[in-house]
Amino acid sequence: MQTARFRSRFAFPCDADGNRKVYFCGNSLGLMADASRDAVEKQMRRWAELGVDGHFHGDPAWLGYHRSVRDVLARLAGARESEVCAMGGLTVNLHLLMTGFFRPAGTRNKILIERGAFPSDRYAVVSQLQLHGLDPQHHLVELEAGPDGLIDDQRVVKAIETYADELALVLWPGVQYATGQFFDLGQICRAARACAVPIGLDLAHAIGNVELQLHDWEADFAAWCSYKYLNAGPGAVAGIFVHDRHADFEGPRLAGWWGHDEASRFRMGPDFEPIRGAEGWQISGAPILNLAALAGALAIYREAEINSLQDCAPDLTAVLIDRIQALPGRPLGLITPAQRERRGCQLSIRVKAGRDRGRELFNQLQHAGVIGDWREPDIIRIAPNPLYNSLDDVNRFMQRLEKALS
């Protein structure tokens, strides 16, 4: 797909003079698609016109509204439709899934994550250990990054093999939030499967951004948010993947009415009969207005017929890498791997001059109309999204960067 083909269908923040800002922050919050506004307003009208009958009437009725996005999510996740479900929030979903898949027993009572994981993931993992009466000081294995700030895929495999007899779960990111590194998830999942260790993936920075093959990789489960590269809005409904081999999950899990078999749900029976597949992990009623915003945003992925943003050309991030590396005497280092297969849209720039200079540089870019984000202690993150960013945005960013550095 040609970069910026859908640019006119997104709303851009503007400066005081009405000029569009350079929006490179889709790794944190994607822009609003006009189709999302239209979809939410449509459901608001249906609420006004139908009231409670909207649950059972309409196309689609609210009772099965979450299924209206299942085809696109399955394609972006590299999964079967029965393996995905739009539901909940990222960390809540991770907790739900870990409650079912993290079952420590005997010597297998540890969880492997990366050191420097997104804080919410670490909070969730630590609390899961504590819920089982385990001490995170002894039962949390954190794999350190190398001198370049990255974690080699082979080191992840080696860690799984080394701790195989002690691990009850691996929770690994698809794209590391701070560095932008895209891991070889197929290799990592194969290693976990070979060692009979359950593996879950946090795909917050991966889904929509890089190509995924969750079914073929045989991950046990995965979770993601939808407000980054899926452009579904702040606090958007998230999503999960549960591999089909767990479609009739027999272990303990947290249950809720919305995950109960739809055919018998309204009989109001006392015993939980889960829907087969990922939908059986739902707890509460589907958030229709949130789902509408997601449906509007995913309509663009459906029209574009892409499996990830890496199907777009030209590669705006590659252009930025080349331009930044060509800057004379630059006090900047690029943490994110340059190879396209090892990254997505995100580019993490380390300001070598230190935190104060880095923060000053970031503030200057913001003042000049560039929207990216800052991560302590010295990282500026930018992420050109080819659905709505263009080469002109890259040129404008570089002009402002060079001026700020002069």
Image (spheres, rainbow, N blue to C red):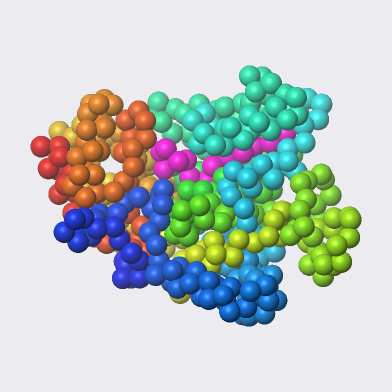
Quadrant where the N terminus is found in the figure: bottom left
Q: Tag count in the figure?
A: 0
Residue in view at x 34 percent, y 42 percent: 373
Q: Residues in magenta?
A: 165-180
Q: Is residue 402 left or right of residue 346?
A: left
Is residue 305 rendered to the left or right of residue 24? Answer: right
Residue shown at 78%/46% (left/top)? 253
Q: Position of residue 173 (x, y in %)?
A: 54, 42
Q: Position of residue 108 (x, y in %)?
A: 76, 29
Q: Residue at x 46, y 57 (%)?
A: 233
For the residue pair 283 and 218, the one nearer the viewer reads as 283
Q: Residue at x 50, y 26 (%)?
A: 144
Q: Nearer the viewer, residue 193 or 261?
A: 261
- Residue 195, visible in the rendered structure: no
Give how far across and how far down residue 22 sits, in percent: 25, 54
Residue located farthest toward the left when viewing the structure as drawn: 406
- Give the position of the C terminus as an image quadrant: top left
Assess whether residue 168 is covered by the magenta stretch: yes
Say above or below: 72 vs 144. below
**Residue 173 shows in the view:** yes
**Residue nearer the viewer, 25 or 185:** 25
Q: Position of residue 2 (x, y in %)?
A: 33, 69
